[in-house]
Image: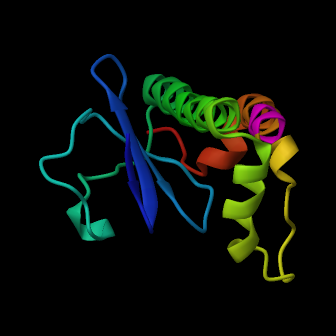
């Protein structure tokens, strides 16, 4: 898992890697599971090609793994540091101009996102078969 301001990159040896841009939920897939060096921009990522049918399954699996990792992270933060800590860390992000999920609902919101992505992956991938 590589977290950057512009993206998340996640890979595993069995499925390859997935790149999730920060402001556009359109997962991009690569057969590479590891990055050669930490990405500082999109240009530092491996080649991200249109998906074959088999790669679409791998991309969906990786995308759902990323969402579940984030959900588990949110659960762990609350278990270890408490809900008040999580609320305080979110205050600077709430500028009143965006929909804001309360800290108590973060983990369940990620679970719901996982279910929606799983049910609609062809829509989210935005990549045709080759």
Q: Which residues are magenta?
A: 107-111
Snapshot colouring: rainbow
Viewer-nearest residue: 87 or 130: 87
Query: Does residue 109 belong to the magenta stretch?
Result: yes
Q: Horizontally, is 51 left or right of 61 in the view?
A: left
Viewer-nearest residue: 71 or 90: 90
User: Against 50, is 17 above or below?
Assistant: above
Viewer-nearest residue: 119 or 23: 23
Rendered image quadrant of residue 76:
top right
Query: How far across and how far down the image is residue 44, in percent?
Result: 21, 63
- Tell which residue pokes out farthest to the top in this image: 14
Rendered image quadrant of residue 1:
top left
Q: Is residue 17 visible?
A: no
Q: Horizontally, is 107 left or right of 4 in the view?
A: right
Viewer-nearest residue: 22 or 16: 22
**Which residue is pictured at 26% across the width and 32% down the height?**
33
Query: How far across and how far down the image is residue 11, in percent?
Result: 34, 33
User: Against 78, is 13 above or below?
Assistant: above
Query: Does residue 48 belong to the magenta stretch?
Result: no
User: Against 16, is 7 above or below?
Assistant: below
Query: How far across and how far down the image is residue 48, in percent?
Result: 34, 51
Q: Is residue 99 visible?
A: yes
Work out which quarter of the rendered image holds the C terminus and state it.
Answer: top left
Q: Horizontally, is 117 left or right of 96 in the view?
A: left
User: Against 94, is 59 above or below?
Assistant: above
**Which residue is pictured at 30% across the width and 71% down the height?**
41
Q: Horizontally, is 56 left or right of 83 in the view?
A: left
**Which residue is pictured at 46% across the width and 25% down the height?**
58
């Amino acid at each position: 898992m590589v977290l950057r301001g512009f993206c998340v990159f996640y890979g595993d040896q069995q499925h390859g890697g997935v790149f999730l841009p920060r402001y556009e939920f359109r997962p991009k897939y690569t057969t590479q599971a590891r990055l050669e060096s930490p990405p500082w921009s999109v240009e530092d990522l491996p080649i991200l090609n249109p998906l074959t049918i088999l790669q679409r399954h791998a991309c969906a699996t990786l995308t759902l793994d990323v969402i579940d990792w984030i959900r588990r992270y949110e659960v762990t933060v609350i278990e270890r540091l408490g809900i008040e800590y999580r609320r305080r860390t979110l205050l600077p992000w709430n500028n009143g101009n965006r929909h804001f999920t309360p800290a108590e609902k973060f983990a369940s919101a990620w679970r719901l996102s996982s279910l929606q992505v799983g049910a609609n992956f062809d829509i989210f991938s935005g990549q045709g078969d080759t």
